[in-house]
Amino acid sequence: MTAPLKHSDPVNVDVALGDRAYDIVIGRGVLSSLGERVAALRPGVRTAIVTDRTVAKYWLEPAETSLADAGIPTSRVVVEEGEISKTYAGLEKVSEALIAAKIERNDLVIALGGGVVGDLAGFAAAILRRGVDFVQVPTSLLAQVDSSVGGKTGINSPQGKNLLGAFHQPVLVIADTAVLDTLSPRQFRAGYAEVAKYGVLGDEAFFAWLEKNHSDIVKGGSAREHAIATSCRAKAGVVSRDERETGERALLNLGHTFGHALEAATGFSDRLFHGEGVSIGMTLAAQFSAKLGMIGEADAARVERHLIEAGLPTRLQDIAGFAQEGLADADALMALMAQDKKVKRGKLTFILLEAVGRAVIAEDVEPAPVRDFLQEKLEHKLALKA
Ligand SMILES: NC(=O)c1ccc[n+]([C@@H]2O[C@H](COP(=O)([O-])OP(=O)(O)OC[C@H]3O[C@@H](n4cnc5c(N)ncnc54)[C@H](O)[C@@H]3O)[C@@H](O)[C@H]2O)c1
Ligand SMILES: O=C(O)C(=O)C[C@@H](O)[C@H](O)[C@H](O)COP(=O)(O)O
Ligand SMILES: [Zn+2]
């Protein structure tokens, strides 16, 4: 782990993917350089910004001004905020708007928003005229540390998370840390789960730093930039070694096997944001690792304690409307997990822990112990309620 950055210097993180390599530019105020950077990358380009209504209210005008100042023509597509847009209907709306705007193969799509907009706009760009390049301008903490990097794009199916999509790398990522000042506290906390994930899966020193400094990340100073840059470096490293998740990249899925099933069980609604599902899923993965004897109970408790301190949910019973159909049912959760993209020949793959800071890929996991473990967690909730 490197020392925290000075507050004012924009930082460049390189995603080393050969002729598809790109920069992640991180810093306060870097949104104003969007036009200049796009013009330098693609002289004469036309652009279409895809964003959501909330982000548009705060950040569309500054983005458009920056592009206009650099002489770049742009159009806009504004979708509804939230997972409701990461759907077939959302994809149709964005694709048809891009076609209507006559976005050509050499033009650029700009995703201005959180992970929903990034995944949706990136997928639309991947299939528009069989592939148009795109730029990520992530505006949520989650998008700045995770979804804008690495080229996973897609939409949800009612049957599961991100079940339709494509690997399509952006050509540039501009992460302006100041835009996070308008993010709601709950969304900020949800994004923090993915920050903590990098510590838990591969960097104990970063996790220990987060345990001491997490509250400073909210304040917006050098700790925020350090956390974002450290997360991006970690993700860029993994992606450059295993772009298409044939191996190591699966580690970035820590907490997601459980988390995605919980998101599906709650109908991809605001009862559970993605990062909140990851927080609960990461806690369950740590506890399941402890149950299998891979880590001590104290390690699992350490992970959960930190997530609670960061204001995140860690238990199934923390989910609003927990008792509703599908959630308090181990078999229903198992059925949802069977749609996980890491499943091979019908067998589950889990990301488990050998230590805080060392995750491993466990293939061929038998369903019975997972089901028993979930049942225990569900009964624990019932015991708490009684
Ligand atoms: N592609 C990947 O590698 C990857 C990685 C992690 C997560 N994801 C996906 O990302 C999605 C979650 O992303 P998210 O948490 O950013 O959700 P999101 O895109 O829904 O954004 C969260 C909310 O915050 C609002 N918002 C965003 N930026 C804002 C700002 N600066 N000011 C005020 N409001 C703002 C949005 O309008 C939205 O209501 C999930 O669909 C998840 O599957 C993808
Ligand atoms: O980039 C990756 O690889 C990840 O797994 C990052 C995750 O945080 C992210 O939620 C991703 O979208 C999950 O991918 P999926 O393949 O499980 O849908
Ligand atoms: Zn995630």
Image (spheres, rainbow, N blue to C red):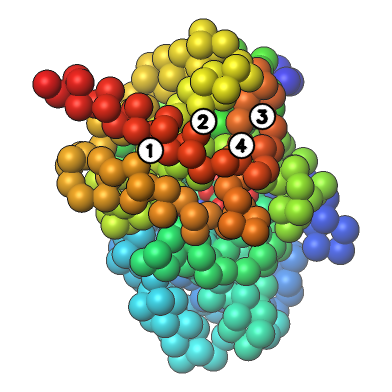
Q: Quadrant of residue 107?
A: bottom right
Do callouts 3 and 4 mark residues in contact (Cβ within 8 Å)? Answer: yes
Q: Secondary structure at mark 3?
A: strand
Q: Residues within 10 Å of mark 3 (few under 14, many from 20)?
A: many
In the displayed structure, does residue 342 sit left or right of residue 143? Answer: right
Q: Which residue occupies the foreground of this view, 204 or 11? A: 204
User: In whole angstroms, how far apart are the C-alphas of marks 1 and 2?
Assistant: 14 Å
Residue that numbered label 3 is attached to: 359
Q: Residue at 47% across / 67% down in the picture?
A: 155
Residue 130 % position (x, y): 66, 85
User: In whole angstroms, how far apart are the C-alphas of marks 4 and 2?
Assistant: 7 Å
Residue that numbered label 1 is attached to: 276
Mark closest to the chain's N terminus, 4 or 2: 2
User: In whole angstroms, how far apart are the C-alphas of marks 1 and 3?
Assistant: 20 Å
- The type of residue carrying mark 2 is Ala
Question: Of tags 1 and 2, which is closer to the observer?
Answer: 2
User: In whole angstroms, how far apart are the C-alphas of marks 1 and 4?
Assistant: 17 Å
Residue that numbered label 4 is attached to: 351
- The type of residue carrying mark 4 is Ile
Label disc, if present, on residue 285 of the rendered structure:
2
Q: Secondary structure at mark 4?
A: strand
> What count of labels does the image hold?
4
Residue 334 % position (x, y): 42, 48
Mark closest to the chain's N terminus, 1 or 3: 1
- The type of residue carrying mark 1 is Glu
- The type of residue carrying mark 3 is Ala
